[in-house]
């Protein structure tokens, strides 16, 4: 994603803005051809079991049994909305007075994401791996909120605002997503592919919403109003985090305690799940059987 932002700015600066879309079109078909030629054709590990359409349907049933997945998906939706709202409207802001930057300079803003790429693994090792996922999600959302407030209400008169927002937003969203995924993967390790699909659908819908809403609000009310929408979405995400505690088994509440550090047996269990189960077809079938039995 970092290179895509940079490349689009460079290409658009020297050619037509349509060129980047033609380039994307060609790259998509190149990826398809490479997958067709080189992706291994493994035999099905469950030839007589669950079929594709039942797998799709079972994704919906997972939501019914796992409130944690609902919480994570809604938070992912809100953060993804904020992400695309910012990066879409940032181009409009920087290409207009008082900045009037070229698309080349605007594309260079993508390099800000290098900071989050370098710092997130360190943060994950010392915070995400040691504390409950919800704690890391809240910290990430607070970074997003702080950066969005600064960028929204100072960005119209100083470029430092959007730079700070890009730094905090990229880092906050990455750290929140890493923590969210570590939480949802422990829900049903045998059906990890379906759990991930549910989460990514919510994130994708959030990206679409952020682009559409951000464009609409910016065109009518400007930078501050579109940024204020992001502040609202981040506030909603934080509210969702506080509605349900990390050890709550139901939909709302904080039963189970406030302890922030991970319990040793939970960490070991997640490591075993990550090392011994890859979410393949046989695991998916076992997960489907568990859902049938009401787990």
Image: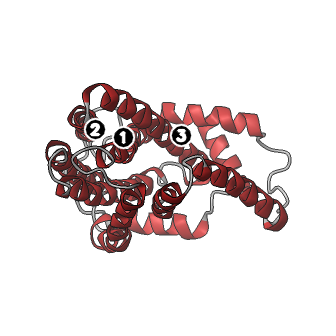
Element carrying mark 3: helix
Res 113 → quadrant: bottom left
**In the image shown, does 160 or 252 lie closer to the viewer?**
160
Query: For the residues carrying marks 2 and 3, which lies nearer the camera in this image?
Result: 2
* C-alpha distance separating marks 2 and 1: 7 Å
42 shown above or below 177: below
Measured Cα–Cα span from mark 2 to mark 3: 20 Å
Q: Is the residue 83 above or below the residue 212 in the image? A: below
Q: Position of residue 108 (x, y in %)?
A: 38, 64
Q: Is residue 253 visible?
A: no
The residue drawn where x is 28% and y is 57% is: 136
Residue that numbered label 1 is attached to:
85
Q: Are marks 2 and 3 in contact (CB under 8 Å)?
A: no
Which residue in the protein does label 2 denote?
230
Question: Could you say which is closer to the camera, residue 75 or residue 103?
Answer: 103
Marks 2,1: beta carbons within 8 A: yes
Q: Earlier in the sequence, mark 2 or mark 3?
A: 3
Q: How is the image coloured?
A: secondary structure
**Residue topped by disc 3:** 201
Q: Residue at x 82, y 62 (%)?
A: 42
Q: Which mark is residue 285?
A: none
Q: Inspect this view and state whether residue 241 appears.
A: yes
Of circles 3 and 1, the one toward us is 1
Q: Is residue 245 left or right of residue 194?
A: left
Going 22% across and 40% down the picture, which residue do you hit? 242
Separation of disc 3 and disc 1 at Cα?
Answer: 18 Å
What secondary structure is marked by label 2? helix
Rendered position, 145 above or below 59: below
In the rendered image, residue 127, in percent from the top left (x then y), is placed at 27, 67
């Amino acid at each position: 994603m970092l290179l895509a932002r940079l490349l689009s700015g460079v290409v658009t600066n020297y050619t037509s803005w349509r060129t980047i879309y033609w380039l994307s079109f060609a790259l998509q078909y190149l990826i398809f051809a490479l997958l067709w030629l080189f992706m291994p054709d493994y035999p099905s590990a469950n030839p007589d079991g669950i079929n594709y359409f039942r797998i799709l349907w079972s994704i919906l049933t997972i939501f019914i049994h796992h409130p944690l997945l609902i919480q994570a998906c809604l938070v992912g939706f809100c953060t993804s909305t904020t992400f695309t709202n910012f990066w879409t409207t940032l181009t409009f802001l920087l290409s207009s007075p008082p900045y009037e930057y070229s698309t080349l300079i605007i594309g260079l803003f993508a390099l800000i994401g290098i900071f989050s790429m370098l710092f997130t693994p360190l943060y994950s090792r010392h915070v995400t791996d040691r504390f409950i996922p919800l704690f890391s999600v809240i910290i990430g959302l607070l970074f997003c909120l702080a950066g969005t407030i600064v960028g929204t209400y100072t960005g119209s008169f100083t470029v430092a605002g959007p730079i700070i927002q890009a730094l905090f937003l990229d880092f906050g969203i990455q750290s929140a997503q890493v923590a969210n995924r570590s939480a949802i993967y422990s829900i049903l390790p045998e059906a990890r592919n379906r759990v991930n699909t549910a989460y990514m659908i919510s994130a994708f819908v959030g990206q679409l919403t952020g682009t559409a809403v951000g464009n609409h609000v910016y065109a009518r009310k400007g930078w501050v109003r579109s940024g204020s929408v992001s502040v609202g979405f981040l506030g909603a995400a934080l509210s969702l985090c506080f509605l349900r505690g990390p050890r709550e088994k139901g939909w709302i509440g904080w039963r189970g305690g406030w302890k922030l550090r991970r319990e040793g047996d939970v960490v070991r269990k997640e490591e075993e799940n990550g090392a011994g189960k890859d979410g393949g077809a046989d695991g998916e079938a076992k997960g489907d059987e568990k859902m049938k039995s009401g787990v």
